[in-house]
């Protein structure tokens, strides 16, 4: 079944540790996105990639890095986790050609707790 | 700055109709999306409006007025499974999606 997968589903992490959240899509979408969702704040864009080989910063990029080596994968890395990065992380993808093709489709999310 | 406003929470009765409003102020406009998000799950796409007027999809309809910076999502014949958060998002002039904080809809029997 086509879609987006994320791993892990959930994780408890000690502060200061490095962590990579994985995201893979099989829809051959050009664009991919990482969001965090915190209660009362809605979805906030961390980083995005319009096409393989390019990345850009979103609204809250500090403390996070991404790479886009190919079309399918878009990992998010926390170099040194802090408790304020406790959140639910969603990966999304879209065709990215404009208009209705910018409909974003979401992965199931990763629930991350930093202690 | 860019801003999207939605009510935080609404309550409605099973079988009734509810209208969830969204107002926006963004740098440019390339369309408005509505998503549904059940608790503990990912957002799922409901509708896309780019022209003024009403788009109907079964029990759900979405309306857009670009001149007023306003949209609403209309849910008819409410069912208990419609209890969820509804997210409004606008595609701005840079084709970045700007998200509202969402409206939590509670359905009572």
Image: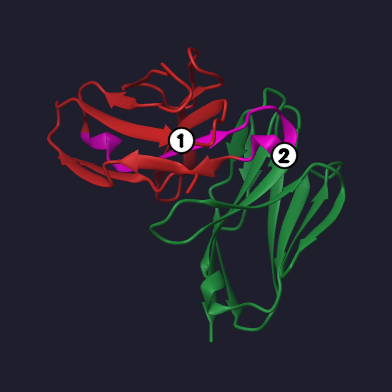
Chain colours: A red, B green
Residue annotated with mark 2: A100
In the rendered image, residue A88, in percent from the top left (x then y), is placed at: 35, 44
Q: Which quarter of the image is occupied by the C terminus of chain A?
A: top left
Q: Please state the extent of the stretch shown in magenta in the rendering.
A: A83-103
Residue annotated with mark 1: A25
Residue located at (28% from left, 47% from top): A9
Residue located at (87% from left, 47% from top): B52
A80 versus A110 height, above or below: above
Is there a contact, CB below 8 Å, between mark 2 and mark 1? Answer: no
A35 versus B65 height, above or below: above
Give the chain of mark 1.
A
Residue located at (32% from left, 44% from top): A110
Query: Outermost residue toward the front?
Result: A1
A36 versus A18 height, above or below: below
In the rendered image, residue B106, in percent from the top left (x then y), is placed at: 52, 72
The CA distance from mark 2 to mark 1 is: 19 Å
Q: Using the image as rendered, state which of residue A25 and residue B53 is in the foreground.
A: A25
| Occupied quadrant, residue B74 | bottom right
Mark closest to the chain's N terminus, 2 or 1: 1
Query: SS of the residue at dot 2?
Result: helix
B5 versus A53 height, above or below: below
In the rendered image, residue B40, in percent from the top left (x then y), is placed at: 38, 58
B84 vs B95, left or right, is: left
Query: Outermost residue toward the bottom?
Result: B109
In the rendered image, residue B92, in percent from the top left (x then y), is placed at: 69, 30
């Amino acid at each position: 079944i086509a879609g987006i997968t994320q791993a892990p589903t959930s994780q408890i992490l000690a502060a200061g540790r490095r962590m990579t959240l994985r995201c893979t899509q099989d829809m051959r979408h050009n664009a991919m996105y990482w969001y965090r969702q915190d209660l009362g704040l809605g979805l906030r864009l961390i980083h995005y990639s319009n096409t393989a080989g390019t990345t850009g910063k979103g609204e809250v990029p500090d403390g996070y890095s991404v790479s886009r080596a190919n079309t399918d994968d878009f990992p998010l890395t926390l170099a040194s986790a802090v408790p304020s990065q406790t959140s639910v992380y969603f990966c999304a993808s879209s065709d990215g050609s404009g208009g209705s093709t910018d409909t974003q489709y979401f992965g199931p999310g990763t629930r991350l707790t930093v202690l | 700055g860019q801003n999207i406003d939605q009510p935080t929470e609404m309550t409605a009765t099973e079988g009734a109709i509810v209208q969830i409003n969204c107002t926006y102020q963004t740098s440019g406009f390339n369309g408005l999306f509505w998503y549904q998000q059940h608790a503990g799950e990912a957002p799922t796409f409901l509708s896309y409006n780019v022209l003024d007027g009403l788009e109907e999809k079964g029990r759900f309809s979405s309306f857009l007025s670009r001149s007023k910076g306003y949209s609403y999502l209309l849910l008819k014949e409410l069912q208990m499974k419609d209890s969820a958060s509804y997210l409004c998002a606008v595609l701005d002039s840079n084709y970045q999606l700007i998200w509202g904080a969402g409206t939590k809809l509670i359905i009572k029997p």
